[in-house]
Image (spheres, rainbow, N blue to C red):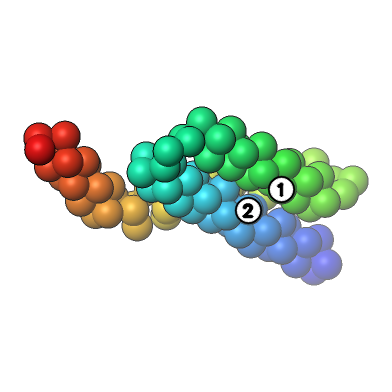
Amino acid sequence: MNEVLSLIFALMAGIVLGMFFFGGLWWTIRRGLSSSRPALWFFGSMLLRTAIVVLGFYYVLGDDWRRLLAALLGFVIARLAVTRLTRGTQQATLQIQEADHAT
C-alpha cells in the first residue's frame, strides 16, 4: 500500500513539475516576444525551469526507478494538458502578432 501511495505522489509531483515547466515556457514566450531583450528572457527562463525540474525529479526519484517513471508520466500528462489549455491563446497571440507586423 505504501508503494502505491509513493507512485501516486510521484505521478502528482510529475504533473506539478510539468505544469511549472510548460506553463513557464508559455509565459516566457508571451513575455519574450514583446521584450526588448528576448534572448535574456529565453535563456534565463530555460536555466531556471530546467534546474527546478531536474532537482524536482531528483527529489522524487529517491531510490526507486519506478517513481521516476511515474513522475515522467505525470510530466507528459502535464505537457498534454498545458498544450490543450493554451491552444486558444496561442492562436489569438499569432493573430495579434500578424496585425502588429502589418502596420
Label 1 residue SS? helix
Left or right of 61 on screen, residue 41: left
Task: Find residue 64 and report its horizontal and vertical position in percent.
Answer: 84, 46
Task: Find residue 7 and report its horizontal and vertical position in percent.
Answer: 72, 58
Which residue is painted at 79% across and 52% down in the image? 60
Look at the image and tell me whether residue 24 can be seen.
yes
Look at the image and tell me whether residue 29 can be seen.
no
**Local crowd at mark 1 within 10 Å, few (<14), some, or many (≥20)?**
some
Label 2 residue SS? helix
Which residue is painted at 38% across and 47% down in the image? 30
Left or right of 15 on screen, residue 50: right
Name the quadrant of the N terminus.
bottom right
Give the residue type that dot 2 points to. Answer: Leu
Residue bearing the label numbered 2: 17
Q: 97 or 16, which is in the foreground?
A: 97
Which numbered marker is on residue 15? Answer: none
**Cβ atoms at labels 1 and 2 below 8 Å apart:** yes
Task: Find residue 72 and report its horizontal and vertical position in percent.
Answer: 63, 44
Measured Cα–Cα span from mark 1 to mark 2:
8 Å
Left or right of 59 on screen, residue 19: left
Q: 53 or 99, which is in the foreground?
A: 99
> Which one is earlier in the sequence, the residue at label 1 or at label 2?
2
Which residue is painted at 37% across and 40% down in the image? 33
Which residue is painted at 36% across and 44% down in the image? 34
Splitting the image into 4 quarters, where does residue 89 fall? bottom left
From the viewer's perspective, is residue 42 above or below residue 95? above
Give the residue type that dot 1 points to. Answer: Ile
Which numbered marker is on residue 52? Answer: 1
Farthest left residue in view: 102
Task: Find residue 43 and report its horizontal and vertical position in percent.
Answer: 58, 33
Name the quadrant of the C terminus.
top left
